[in-house]
Amino acid sequence: MRASHLLAVSVLTAGLTIAGFTTHPSAAWAAPGIPAAPTRPAVTVTIVAGRTTTQLQSAADDVGALLEEQGVTLGAYDEVHPSLAARLTPNETVRVVRVANWTRTVRQPIAAKTVHRISLSLAPGRTKVLSAGTPGLRETMVRFTQRDGGRIAKNVVETRVLRSAKPRVIAEGVGEYDAFVRFEGRGLDKTAYVARAALTMVATAYTANCYGCSGITASGRPAGHGIVAVDPRVIRLGTRLYIPGYGYAVAGDTGGAIRGNRIDLGFNSLTDALRFGRRAVTVYRL
């Protein structure tokens, strides 16, 4: 190839500055045997990054190339819509959401529960703290997320108990009664008891020699102090009970008028029964 032809090819492919004017290589021209690369026309696009909006012309093929072309740097948690691989279309709006993520570990106390126990060694109405209890400790890992500088959202990632709480135990005095002596031989101690359940009931009194009474209860026990009549649907026959103001008892009888939260307390004498009368009581099932 002659030198003059080589010069012409150089001018067309690389461009030449003559008298302040620069010639640019034409897409229609290429070196012999090399096809010309297609050129994509520029389109109008809008980039919304955080609180900044920019409208521009770009010939980039996809969203990723557009952001690289414009020098938009993405953080580790930033989001791009549409995706980086999406092809750029005319009048496209590309949104870059700036996302900040961080975690924090928080330790919080666990409140100690309070447990109430019945104590026979304390007078009725008196209380005594048997154990002060100690609070527990819980560790929680929380992840915080903020999008475009807006409201911070939080999400609990993990929670674990570092130290369990120990309950606070309070003894409540209910006093001792004559019936205690009889029930002591059946395995009841003078120490505190935990009632599985407490019921508020209406109590009446009866004696073994009341009108129409045989003196023998439904359980076969003789009627008297410490034997009470209950509704078996509420308290099972044979259940051991404690009733402040009356003492220990056994659910050993039933009665036609004893329905629901009603209880009939046995007494050894009519005088004691009349003195007790009718009143609301708390019944502890032991």
Image (spheres, rainbow, N blue to C red):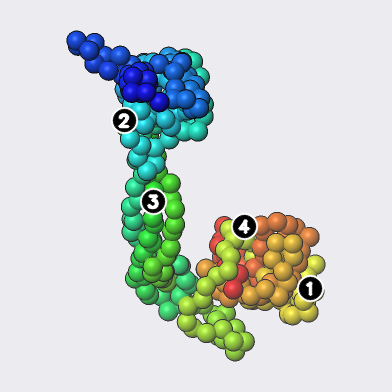
- Considering every residue shown, the one lying at the far left of the view is 19
Q: Residue at x 56, y 83 (%)?
A: 188
Disc 2: which residue: 71
Marks 2 and 1 close (CB-CB < 8 Å):
no
Q: Is residue 207 left or right of residue 80?
A: right
Disc 4: which residue: 202
Going from the N terminus, do you reach mark 3 or mark 4 first? 3
Disc 3: which residue: 142
Q: Position of residue 82 (x, y in %)?
A: 49, 28
Give the secondary structure at mark 3. Answer: strand
Marks 3 and 4 close (CB-CB < 8 Å):
no
Query: Residue type at mark 3?
Result: Val
Quick check: can you spot residue 105? yes
Disc 1: which residue: 218
Front one among 277 and 108? 108
Q: Is residue 169 left or right of residue 210?
A: left
Where 271 sits versus 55, above or below? below
Give the secondary structure at mark 4. Answer: strand
Q: Position of residue 87 (x, y in %)?
A: 51, 26
Going from the N terminus, do you reach mark 3 or mark 1 first? 3
Camera-nearest label, 4 or 2: 2
Camera-nearest label, 2 or 3: 2
Give the secondary structure at mark 1. Answer: loop
Q: Is residue 148 left or right of residue 124?
A: left
Mark 3 and mark 4: Cα distance apart in space: 52 Å
Marks 3 and 1 close (CB-CB < 8 Å):
no
Quick check: can you spot residue 10? no
Residue 167 falls in which quadrant of the image?
bottom left
Going from the N terminus, do you reach mark 2 or mark 1 first? 2
Query: Residue type at mark 1?
Result: Ala
Q: Locate the N terminus and report the quarter of the image it occupies.
A: top left
Other residues around mark 2 within 10 Å, as few (<14) / some (14–19) / many (≥20): few
